[in-house]
Image (cartoon, helix red, strand yellow):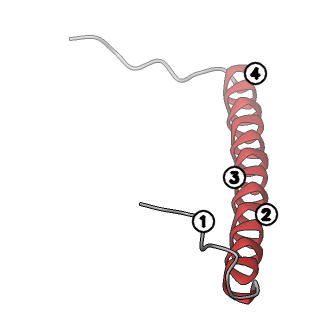
Amino acid sequence: MSTYEQPSQDKLLNMYNQHEANTAQIREDAARAMAELNGRRIEFELALEGIFTKPEGVFRDISF
């Protein structure tokens, strides 16, 4: 049976700092993704608004 060795204070501090750096990077990535999605949502809403506010006859040449 092996015995547990307590990690050194330096190792624990390094692990904590790495965890904090990873958490900060994840938060930055998430904020960037949220901003990008919000921008795309706004573009989509504006595109829809444009589609539904165009004068009649704009789509008469489109066939399916």
Which numbered disc, 2 or 1, marks the residue that appears first in the sequence? 2
Q: Inspect the image, locate mark 1, and give the three-letter code of the amino acid beneath it.
A: Asp
Answer few, some or many: residues within 10 Å of disc 1's Cα (few below 14, many 20 plus, some between 14 and 19).
few
- Where the N terminus falls, by quadrant? top left
Q: Is residue 19 above or below residue 50?
A: above
Q: Which residue is mark 4?
A: 10
Residue 42, picture quadrant: bottom right
Q: Residue at x 69, y 52 (%)?
A: 30
What is the CA distance from the residue labelled 2 to the residue labelled 3?
A: 14 Å
Left or right: 55, with 7 as reference point: right
Camera-nearest label, 3 or 4: 3
Q: Residues within 10 Å of mark 3 (few under 14, many from 20)?
A: few
Q: CA distance from mark 2 to mark 1?
A: 31 Å
Label 4 sits on a secondary structure element that is helix
Provide the residue designation for mark 3.
Answer: 30
Q: Which residue is mark 1?
A: 61
Q: Nearer the viewer, mark 2 or mark 4?
A: 2
